[in-house]
Amino acid sequence: MRLLVVIVNYRTADLTIDCLDSLADEMTALAGQARVVVTDNASGDESVPRITQALNERNWDWVTFEPLAHNGGFSYGNNVPIRQDLVSEDPADFYLLLNPDTLVRPGAFTALLTFMAEHPDVGVAGSLLEFPDGSPQPTLHRAPTPWRALDDGARIGVLSRVLGNRCFPIIAENGTQPCEWVSGASMMVRRQVFEQVGLLDEGYFLYFDEVDFCMRVQQAGWKIFCVVESRVMHLEGVSTGIGEARKRRARYWYESRRRFLLKFYGIKGLIMADTLWFAGKMLSVVRRMGWPLGDPTHFVRDLIGGDLRALSNGEARSLAYGGEAAVEGTDVAERTRPEQSQANL
């Protein structure tokens, strides 16, 4: 079984080098059956010379480094080497998307490959993600829906139980099990899946891209699993800052959320999601006798305002009814996406 690991770097040279260091034993164990491609999404800092120097000093002959001409986002950075490999004479059997802010525990790759070989109906398998102290991160996910926006806005335990969303997301306490999507921080994909459903949708700059992909994989009849024997430490949000309380969320997060809802639920679904989210937020305000803390700065304005603009200027209709912006994966033309002020991969 041949494996291609893809790591997308954007101004995270130190993290990328540490991640590669953690792969050395895995690559030895796989005895030449695996290789790694690191793409650089036009970082514009010292990433390219620093990563190049590290590769030369460590003599990692299993790594190929490919600086890209522009920052096209997470999907673009992964799609470039995967697309190249798929049309090669000897393509890989499996592809592993791996974040640079990860450290791979011993046996993580072998566990995923073994599970995929034993379960041919599984198209995507994710690792159990861990915090630096070894405790598990929420790993099993259910796909966002308009109804779940109510729970997301309210964040009230009783409402979560009524809606049946206690498992959104959950920590993998019951062993390897199926889910609706796994994190792109460590996600293995069978070659036949890419051949059938296409690559990642490059219309997403960052976030919701792996959710979109997993939804299409399930629609094509494949199963998705989290494999707890594959353990990967993940410094969640380090490269994007999304985990920082009260920090204003980057515009591309809202664009990605909107794109996802419009693609899978249409204009009515987007309006329903926003309405239910706001209703949930009002429930939370009443219950707590004040605006709850924890939302990013200007979250309501950025979320609702952005969606209203998209509905009024025709962007939402284009996405919902199959316009150019809604084209997926391998059908997306190569293009330069304008840099956004907070675009950190």
Image (cartoon, rainbow, N blue to C red):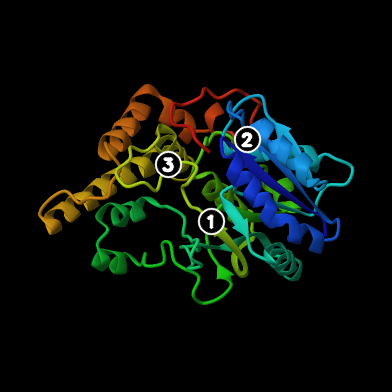
Residue 235, placed above or below residue 10:
below
Check contact, mark 2 vs mark 3: CB within 8 A: no
Tell me the quarter of the picture where residue 31 sits.
Answer: bottom right
Q: Which mark is residue 76?
A: 2
- Taking the spot 75% from the left edge, 61% from the top edge, the residue there is 25
Image location (x, y in percent) of residue 281: 22, 50
Q: Nearer the viewer, residue 317 or 137?
A: 137
Residue wearing tag 3 = 257
Dot 2: what SS? helix
Task: Using the numbered discs, state the Cα–Cα distance from disc 1 to disc 2 in whole angstroms.
Answer: 21 Å
Image location (x, y in percent) of residue 242: 41, 44
- Between disc 1 and disc 2, the foreground one is 1
Residue wearing tag 1 = 234
Check contact, mark 1 vs mark 2: CB within 8 A: no
Q: Nearer the viewer, residue 228 or 243?
A: 243
Q: Which mark is residue 109?
A: none
Check contact, mark 1 vs mark 3: CB within 8 A: no
Residue sitting at the far right:
89
Amino acid type, label 2: Tyr
The first of marks 1 and 3 along the sequence is 1
Query: Crowding near pointer 3: few (<14 within 10 Å), some, many (20+)?
Result: some
- Taking the spot 59% from the left edge, 23% from the top edge, the residue there is 336
Q: Nearer the viewer, residue 114 or 41?
A: 41
